[in-house]
Image (cartoon, grey):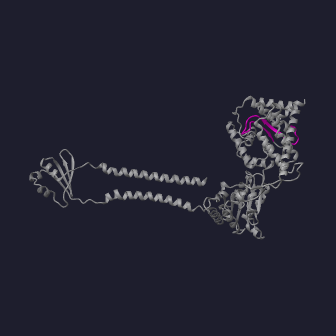
Amino acid sequence: MKKEKKEKKVIKKITKNIFLILIVFLILGSFFSLFEIGKTKETKIQISQLIQEIENNKIKKIVVKDDTIEILTLDDQTQITYKEPGENFIGLLNDYNVSPDKIKGLTIDIQNTKKSIWPDLLIYALLPLLFIGIFFYYFSRQLRKTTQKTFSFGQVKSFKTNRQENKVAFKDIGGVKEAKQEVREIIDFLKKPKKFTALGAKIPKGVLIVGAPGTGKTLLARAVAGEANVPFFHISGSEFVEMFVGVGASRVRDLFRQAKKKVPCIIFIDELDAVGRIRGGGLYGGHDEREQTLNQILVEMDGFEPNIGLVIIAATNRPDVLDPALLRPGRFDRRIILDIPDIRDREEILKIHCQKKPLVKDVSLRKIAERTPGFSGADLANLMNEAAILAVRQNKKEISMAQILESIEKVLLGPERKSHIISPKEKKITAYHEAGHALVSHLLPHCDPVRKVSIIARGQAAGYTLKMPREDKYLHTRSEFIDDLAALLGGYAAEKIFFGEVTTGASNDLKQTAHLAKKLVTEYGMSEKIGPVAFTQNKGSNFLNQQLINHRQFSEKTAQLIDEEINSLISRAFQQAQKIIQEHRTDLNKIAQLLLKKETLERQEFLQIFKDGKK
């Protein structure tokens, strides 16, 4: 973005200068034209005509200026003629036999002036040359700047900050206690390096921060620089790679050259996988431009001592594609993992993002944390921002719990589409479909609790059943997956039982069911027939980035067995969903009818249906 803005500024400046120069030329042209306008129109005549006018007494005045004769007639017309250089005007009249009386009657003004050429030279020659010179000066200056930019491709456009307003501290980051502890050593080293060198300790040159998108990798790196109070060089991996050969390697050299002048400091390379992928995967072998850039990074990391005060921090969410040479001891040998925050971390992150937002007193950050499992720090920041925008839209001065809960669904599923009008028949099918999901999920013991059921369209979904776990889960059992398969097919089963046929509304459910069943068989070893075997695919060649040539490690007979087991799991789950719906047909009807009436059911309203049924 910064590069594009600078280019636009240069283009705008050049256009402005050319426009100003054109205006100056127009003004200059108008100025020159004044000299011509100010001149009286003169009629050129011959000497013989002048003599005839003298004889006829038509002359009022004659002005002789060197070799030029200006004549003013009685009718105030201006005429001009010329004589021989050095010839006397009176002698000229005598030569033409003009009588002395006629000569005496004339008013003759003889002006012996020698006209200087400098005014004409200044006006008609020097001034245009001056303006042309100014034009070429501005043009060449802009051209020189462009040329400098052309030859500055090899210079890195890194973002360096150590300003007070841009600093981030650990108090601005919620959770990640272990990660903070890991980087504290780096902060201590940057502040007091002698404490480490006294014992012969060497601080790691490179620190690799690994985590899912939005978990705070960049924020943690900035916090390290903020806590240590050192310059922070921030650059993305993609900024090293250009269309010109050798530019990436040159920028790497320039980056390290700049950083060594500012030690102690931190170099932060974001999205390291953009330039640090496994070598040998390009179409042109080892001569690929990206690979040359990676080679230069490896060389530079080996080229400085570990205790000079330069620490390289990199971030990626794809550590599996990084070149092994980057991860060996002496380079990025310290790895910090940032996980998706748990409930306590989410509560801490919410406190940080709520600091400048006025909340209603009954807002419970703990309840919000319970409703947001799987949310990253960026998701939580987006959640609170959406809640604030919703409060402004509703002309509220404080953010309420209802607005936050609404924003959770918006972040998960997309905005409500209340204007999406469907026919009564389609609305009824949607109600029974979602009621099928909710009923099966509620009655199966290993499914997550149903929080909300709605037939209001959100995003691409015509309706949705929102389920949330009671607590954060890191391990899942086979029983949970089997119940989830049945819950996914609850809507499909409800459509088939109540309407005798199914619609395209279940297409996404079927995709999720097939994907989950395949993982149970091929990855998790949860198939009773196949047993504890994980069927992974071996990526055969590095050619074309290892994506085109894949080889199976199992036979056709095993592949057929896998397909049969996947179909068996899905079939059993469908039968289970059908059985539950048939046995609790009355409850499903109540849920569907209430959905058609209210469109949305919260957890308490949903549970009340089953409590009333038991009475």
Q: Residue at x 76, y 70 (%)?
A: 198
Horizontal arrangement in the rendering, residue 465 relative to residue 293 (left or right) = right
Residue 552 screen position, x and y as percent: 80, 54
Whether 445 is among the magenta residues is yes
Q: Which residues are magenta?
A: 442-467
Residue 577 screen position, x and y as percent: 86, 37
Horizontal arrangement in the rendering, residue 446 relative to residue 169 (left or right) = right
**Quarter the C terminus occupies:** top right
Whether 592 is among the magenta residues is no
Judging depth in this view, the residue of 593 and 385 nearest the camera is: 593
Q: Quadrant of residue 314?
A: bottom right
Q: Quadrant of residue 385?
A: top right
Judging depth in this view, the residue of 494 and 171 nearest the camera is: 494
Q: Quadrant of residue 88?
A: bottom left
**Residue 473 appears in the figure:** no
Judging depth in this view, the residue of 279 and 386 nearest the camera is: 279
Residue 610 screen position, x and y as percent: 87, 33
Residue 150 screen position, x and y as percent: 56, 60
**Residue 563 appears in the figure:** yes
Judging depth in this view, the residue of 451 and 299 nearest the camera is: 299
